[in-house]
Image (cartoon, rainbow, N blue to C red):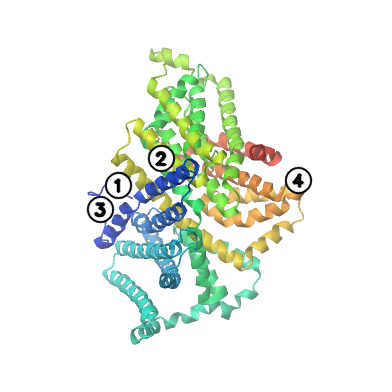
Amino acid sequence: MPTDTEILDFDTARHPGRMPSVIAHLSRFIGHAIPPLYLVCAAITVFEVFTRYVLASPTQWAFEVVMTLCALAWVLSAGYVTLYRRHIAITVITDMASEQTRRALGMVSTIVSAVAIYILLEASLTPMLKAVDLVQRTGSGFNSPMPMMLKIGLVAGTVLYVVQLFGNLLEDVRSRLWRRVVTIAGIVLALRILALLLDHYLGSSALTDFFWSLFSPLEPLSNLGREMDIRSLPLSWVTVFIVAALLVLMMTGMPLGVATLTVSIFCALLYFGPRGLFLVSSNVTGLLEHYTLVAVPLFVLMSCILERSGVAKDLFDAMSIFAGNLRGGVAVQTTVVAVVLAAMTGIMGGEIVMLGLVALPQMLRLGYDRKLAMGVICAAGSLATLIPPSIIMIVYGLAAQVGIGDLFMAGALPGMLYASLYILYILVICRLRPQMAPTSSEIAERAGEEQTLARHRLIAVIMALLVIGMVMGSIYAGIASVTEAAGVGVIGACIVAAIRMELNWKMLLDALMRTTTTVGTIIWLVLGAVSLVGIYNVIGGAAFMRELFTGLDMHPMLIILLMMAVLMVLGTFMEWIAIVFITVPIFAPVVMDLGPALGLEPEQAALWFGVLFVMNMQIYFLSPPFGPAAFWLKSVAPSDVKLQEIFVAMLPFIVLQIIGLAMVIMFPQIALFLPEYLSQ
């Protein structure tokens, strides 16, 4: 995998191997062309807030333009992300396999991925052509062709995706014969798309009839479900099959988004035949119309700009003064800085990496216990899952149809609870074992220097608080929606970088490219998961799971605990975003039904469960064997730090997280107090 420098360099980035250069150049060109769209979206969003509240003259066009530009940037990044193989996948099994087995699994994964994405492409082509014929519009006051543009964008994105997959396959295949087979297969599929276009615009012809005859042997597969009488099978069997199929595909190293998309396509064909592919396409297209999702790339961009501006380092240095002569004060200040960074960015991985670069070397240099230092960084760095603005909360709110502003308010106190537990543990363990952490006076005496609060560090603290105030204040005051607040945060981050003399085109391009890569990996996983959940709900899966849980002869609180256990197990091997879209649409309605039995209104129950879910996901970020926090810290830790050592260091903090989760389960008002108080 290339380094970030190679990815960002226009002149020197060259993809290795024998991949046809035209495919690589196309993916790279589009990958560098679309990132500025996110900056345009942020500027338009802030302009809309300004015109609405300052000029009292809101626009009619901002919402639709931002939604269109952002969705196009999402889907068109597919080729670029695939070029550098950045899609999220579970590789633990393939990493343990031999080189030959790993290569074989990789090729199988790529072939299945190409087939699945091609099927999505073909299923999306007809709706796109109809939308173009009608010049489909929103019907709003602005009446933009947003629906048509989104359908065109989805088709273009899938084309880039499948073409790049064929490029990757050509690189991986060593045999000249198989390379020719792959090339011929690609040409045949391209001609089939051409035949579909000709059939739509010119009607049936000898050419189209010829191509349909080439694929006639596959027609029995489309009626496989009817021959198997799949509808007569119990949904419990179908559910087990879906879970098993997902696990098998994931273990091959296939991108998680493609794995869920493949299973959804298979289920759609089994239950509904070729017409079922329309459901897959409509589910995917419908997701692109969710304005709330625009907040994700904007918050990611805000985080990347702040990271590049150097605020984190100055903020950490400033907090060392405020920590005073406290034993373990640097670990405490790391936790406090993590809280501030979480409230500024909402991004987990970036925060752990920042703290790993800034705080870990300093704690190790000052003589802190290694395990304490690493555990604090991983645990505190993952607070961004819970403290608003949290990306996980945005995605959960979308999946559960819960107000994201309410989720942000509900997560604030539990987030502070976790931070307080971490600080309390640090103080107690350092009191019991003074050798684990020196005091600031001992550090100053050893260094022979006096600690002072430099002016630029004080300014960093003020700037951090201003960014937090701009983002969260605009949400809680009702001035801006979550998405609009994210746009405000991007512009605020740019202002901070400019004041610090760090804002330049290279830094901004770096932040934009990182945003494109991050969001490009997330969006296709979301599209696949939404497609699978949509098909599962149509065949009655959601109703089946609801009846299964509500029919259990158990106290409602035990059902909640069972759900928490399921989430913890899934968190040991599955990405959080897949867990959200696979479990939340099933669990959230059940929890709402259980609400009255728990003494809560259905809306309160959904909000409370959302906080529990996110707290559970924070445990996931630390849990062995695949806890992402450990891998993020390992990527920037000294070379002598072992992965096993990091996992051991995180164990006390996992216990603290479970204690905090239990407290919010027993006392729901910890999560519900702030939303209820602020809504009065």
**Contact between labelled residues 1 and 4, with CB atoms less than 8 Å apart:** no
> In whole angstroms, how far apart are the C-alphas of marks 3 and 1?
11 Å
> Residue at left 41%, top 61%?
105
Q: Secondary structure at mark 1?
A: helix
Residue at screen point 55% across, 69% down:
267
- Looking at the rendered structure, the kind of residue marked 1 is Leu
The type of residue carrying mark 3 is Arg
Badge 3 is on which residue?
Answer: 14
Q: Is residue 403 above or below residue 314?
A: below
Q: CA distance from mark 3 to mark 2?
A: 33 Å
Q: Can you tell which of label 4 and label 1 is closer to the viewer?
A: 4
Q: Which residue is mark 1?
A: 8
Q: Nearer the viewer, mark 3 or mark 2?
A: 2
What is the crowding at mark 3: few (fewer than 14 residues within 10 Å), some, or many (at least 20)? some
- In contact (CB < 8 Å): disc 4 and disc 3: no
Indicate the secondary structure of the residue bearing disc 3.
loop
Q: State the CA–CA distance, disc 1 to disc 2.
A: 22 Å
Three-letter residue code for mark 4: Gly
- Of mark 3 and mark 2, the one earlier in the sequence is 3
Residue designated by label 2: 491
Please say if the residues under marks 4 and 2 sit with CB atoms less than 8 Å apart.
Answer: no
Whether 499 is drawn above or below 389: the answer is: above
Mark in the foreground, 4 or 3: 4
The residue beneath circle 4 is: 599
| Residue 133 showing in the rendered view | yes
